[in-house]
Image: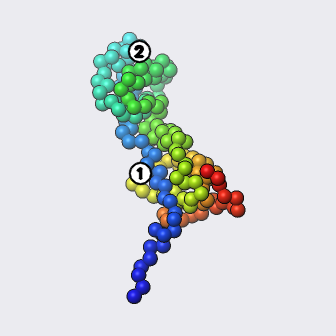
Amino acid sequence: MDSIVNKVAESGILTLNLEQFIPANVVSFDLKPFLFMELILKEKEFRAALLAHDWNPYHNKSVAVFCSVDAIIPVWAYMLVTNYLQPIAERIHLGDVEQARTQWTLLAIQEMDTTTYANQRVVIKGCGEIAIPDAAYVAVTAKLRPVVRSLMYGEPCSTVPIYKQKNNPVVS
């Protein structure tokens, strides 16, 4: 009787799951509750509210700072919030949670060590538990194309070819 052969496992294809680059513990800091009538920033009251605020929930978190209402917020207000967050938060971003996740994901891809992928056949995992920003797929393609033998999208058993190296092997 013939044994079952796992051709995917024997293919030598490396799978890269972009979920590993998505930051965990991203929380938001909305300026709206700190505004007079949730619309107007009054400096004295704003400063007093920030001083009285419990900053502990932001400890070791990635914080997205934004204002959810259409109010005129002077830049110093964001700076003041950052002043309180900087000693306790892991990192801070001006923008909503989705924008922050995208920025930090792109940064993680940019800082990624590509040694493991040099001269390899790589598939970028196409679906998973966490939504991946489209920009991450663009960034990882730009990062890996110069070093991989081939780049694909999807699952090892069903891929869409993106790039295949011609004749000149990459030297790492």
Sort mark 2 into few (<14), some (14-19) or many (20+) by Cα contacts within 10 Å.
Answer: few
Q: Nearer the viewer, residue 12 or 88?
A: 12
Q: Residue at x 49, y 42 (%)?
A: 108
**What colour scheme has been applied to the protein in the rendered image?**
rainbow
The amino acid pointed to by label 1 is Ile
Total count of labels: 2
Q: Residue at x 48, y 39 (%)?
A: 104
Q: Position of residue 148 (x, y in %)?
A: 60, 56
The amino acid pointed to by label 2 is Lys
- Mark nearest the camera among 1 and 2 is 1
Q: Position of residue 155 (x, y in %)?
A: 48, 63
**Which of the numbered marks, if any, corresponds to residue 130?**
1
Label 1 – label 2 distance at C-alpha: 39 Å
Q: Nearer the viewer, residue 162 or 65?
A: 162
**Which of the two labelled residues, at mark 1 and mark 2, occupies the earlier sequence position?**
2
> Dividing the image into 4 quarters, which one contains the N terminus?
bottom left
Q: Residue at x 35, y 19 (%)?
A: 50
Residue indicated by mark 2: 42
* Image quadrant assignment for residue 67: top left
The answer to whether residue 130 of the structure is visible from this angle is: yes
The answer to whether residue 158 of the structure is visible from this angle is: no
